[in-house]
Amino acid sequence: MTIDKIEIFEKAGTPLVVAGPCSAESEEQVMAVASALAGRVTLFRAGLWKPRTRPGCFEGVGKEALPWLQRVKREYRLPVATEVANAEHVELALSAGIDVLWVGARTTVNPFAVQEIADALRGCDVPVLVKNPVNPDLELWIGAFERLNNAGVSRLGAIHRGFSSYGEKCFRNAPQWQLPIELRRRLPDLPIICDPSHIAGKRELVMSLSQQAMDLNFDGLMIETHCNPVCALSDARQQVTPDELFLMLDRMVRRSAACGDSKLSSYRMQIDEIDDALMALIAKRMEVSREIGEVKRERGVAVFQAARYNEVMQRCEEYCRLARLDAEAMKDIFEVVHSESIRQQLDIVNDCIKK
Ligand code: PEP
Ligand code: MN
């Protein structure tokens, strides 16, 4: 694969910063964010065509917003980027002079859609950033770069925005840092930007994720920025104000690529992710235990059931044997988990007695 450098990225310092609202909502909103960001960021982002999970949500203003991005470019000399999901978007964006295009996570999962975009880009010399697919499939991500590259697009970049999963979780999209790290190993010339906004899902986590991305030597950040985030028409919980963005950038510690610490940081981040998942699972287990407590109360069944306790411990032992884990250590952990479940159930029964 031939990957060429993207000039506007080359001129930027590290980290390269892409910022702007999740969606272009109105001309005033776009110009207000751009005016605050001008001079401080490398590339202005705004979504025109928004892929929404459920119908009925704000789906973007579409091509009506192209002249607003042209104004940003002209009046603030700020290069602009938007998301494209089909050939029509590509044609409209190119004829409006949009500087950089990106392919969204919900598009990267679909090889037909990526191929359609690649075909529409044949013969055009525009840089394209590709977000990871929503599911943690590195081959699908690399496949998208190959499709674009085969169509002659050589100025490519990746955006890591995390991976979706089912159930309660700390992040909107789990970072799974090992995937972008493996992407870097497989395509060392490809710049990789982190999008902490879509990983976090809430603005409070954006700073620490950005710092983690810096610790792992990412080439830049894409951070959703809005002058009035709570009123944003999409992704209101995760957008930050321009001032909050500047504060984060000022506080961020840049690491030198040579310090050799990134391997350690990557392992620590993996441990943190596993701990978060463990905690979420324990919380889920307690929730189910309390449901069981309700059923036991209704049916007049005793909370502690020795046979069930033995069954739980036996399953634990069996798993340890298969996974070559220390059975004694795991039994200690499970005893604590089980006794906390019993305590939760007793709570439910006692609550009812008090009433
Ligand atoms: C976005 O950048 O606003 C967006 C829709 O992101 P993603 O494709 O990562 O969900
Ligand atoms: Mn968004």
Image (spheres, rainbow, N blue to C red):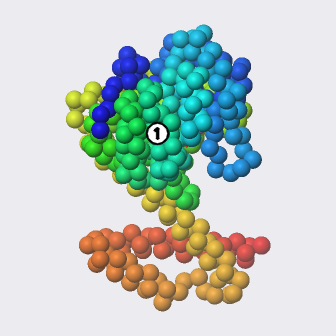
336 lies left or right of 68:
left
Q: Residue furthest bottom?
A: 307
Q: Quadrant of the C terminus?
A: bottom right
The x and y percentages for residue 297 are 68, 81
Q: Quadrant of the N terminus?
A: top left
Q: Residues within 10 Å of mark 1 (few under 14, many from 20)?
A: many
Q: Residue furthest right?
A: 355
Q: Quadrant of residue 128?
A: top left
The answer to which of 85 and 227 lies nearer the viewer is 85
* Above/below status of 213 relative to 16: below
Disc 1 residue type? Ala
The x and y percentages for residue 177 are 37, 46
For residue 229, say whether it is visible. no
- Does the residue tagged 1 have its C-beta within 8 Å of any atom of ligand 1? no
* Above/below status of 13 relative to 265: above
226 lies left or right of 94:
right
The x and y percentages for residue 211 are 41, 33
109 lies left or right of 260:
right
* Above/below status of 72 relative to 279: above
Q: Quadrant of residue 11?
A: top left
The x and y percentages for residue 166 are 54, 59
> Residue shown at 41%/19% (left/top)?
8
Mark 1, secondary structure of its residue: helix
> Residue shown at 43%/29% (left/top)?
123
Q: Which residue is identified by label 1?
A: 118
29 lies left or right of 155:
right
> Residue shown at 48%/33% (left/top)?
121
The answer to which of 105 and 98 lies nearer the viewer is 98
The answer to which of 109 and 214 lies nearer the viewer is 109
Q: Quadrant of residue 218?
A: top left
* Above/below status of 184 relative to 328: above
> Residue shown at 44%/70% (left/top)?
336
